[in-house]
Amino acid sequence: MGVFRHLIWIAAPVAGLVLGVNVAAAQQPSAPAKLTAETCLGCHGVEGFTIPDDKGGTRNLHVDKDKFSKSVHGSRDCVDCHKQITEVPHQKLDRIRVDCVSCHRDQLEEAKDAKDAKKITTLSLVMDRIDEYLKSVHARPNAQDQSETNATCYNCHQAHYVYPPGSPQRAEWRQNLPNICGKCHEGQLAAYKTSVHGREVLEKNNPRAAVCSDCHSRHEVESASLDATRLDITQNCGGCHQANL
């Protein structure tokens, strides 16, 4: 009987300890569930969804569900990129922070770990373009924080509607590229519209005519005032005008 009482005395605090751990765990608030794209599109997928901007106007936050689902990002949840968003409803963001560079770099490493040859090929090409971008005038003054640069990935690429080369949607984006560049380079866009290139692209929708990236390169963009840049542009012209090079 004495031995039995001794065992009870030992077991009691042990049982209490286990019970205490379980109770404490139960009292801890559970991590909020990850927001799905479906949840976000419940508001942002509504056509005409806007919020007031700082200039007395409105800011369009509508994302076309069908176009997004067909894009290369369509299989991902919105918060994979918009990491600032953790709950719904959420406050207006002072500044959007989307790290395209780190995301694609991490995806490439994951593909290598999984030995996924197809993804490795695709993401390696993306990272080559990113490395070119990080050396460009667009990536300055802060290549490490893409929200604090002259132009970041999503200023040129429609982040919600990125399509693979060869697709009709990609061709449509390319034809509109002068207008995208023109959001920052208004004077250059005005001059381009009067040129033979601009009239062919913007008026005649000629897919073979030159857009901005055909002459100024795609990602390794430098100031057009530099002699090296002018030489590169001249060389790029030869891609179409070989007889004139």
Image: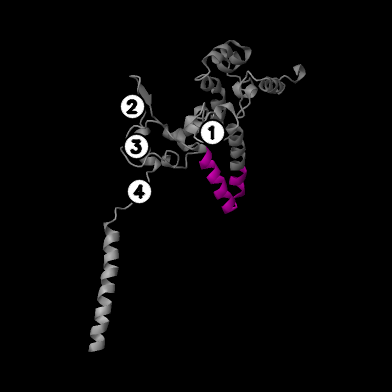
Q: Residue 245 or 91: which is nearer the viewer?
A: 91
Q: Mark 1 or mark 3: name the one nearer the start of the chain.
A: 3
Residue 113 part of the magenta segment: yes
Position of residue 21 measured from the top left corner of the image (x, y, whole percent)? 29, 64
Q: Residue at x 59, y 50 (%)?
A: 112
Q: Residue furthest bottom?
A: 1
Element at label 1: loop
Judge the density around disc 2: few (<14), some (14-19), many (≥20) Cα neighbours within 10 Å. few
User: Would you name the residue on which mark 4 appears?
Assistant: 33
Q: CA distance from mark 2 to mark 4?
A: 26 Å
User: Would you name the residue on which mark 1 appears?
Assistant: 143
User: Would you name the residue on which mark 3 appears?
Assistant: 42
**Quick check: 10 left or right of 71?**
left
Going by the numbered disc 4, the residue's amino acid type is Ala
Q: Mark 3 or mark 2: name the one nearer the start of the chain.
A: 3
Residue 213: mark: none
Q: Which residues are magenta?
A: 101-121
Q: CA distance from mark 3 to mark 4?
A: 16 Å
Closer to the eye: label 1 or 3: 1
Closer to the eye: label 3 or 2: 2
User: Would you name the residue on which mark 2 appears?
Assistant: 51
Closer to the eye: label 3 or 4: 4
Residue 105 part of the magenta segment: yes
Element at label 4: loop
Going by the numbered disc 2, the residue's amino acid type is Ile
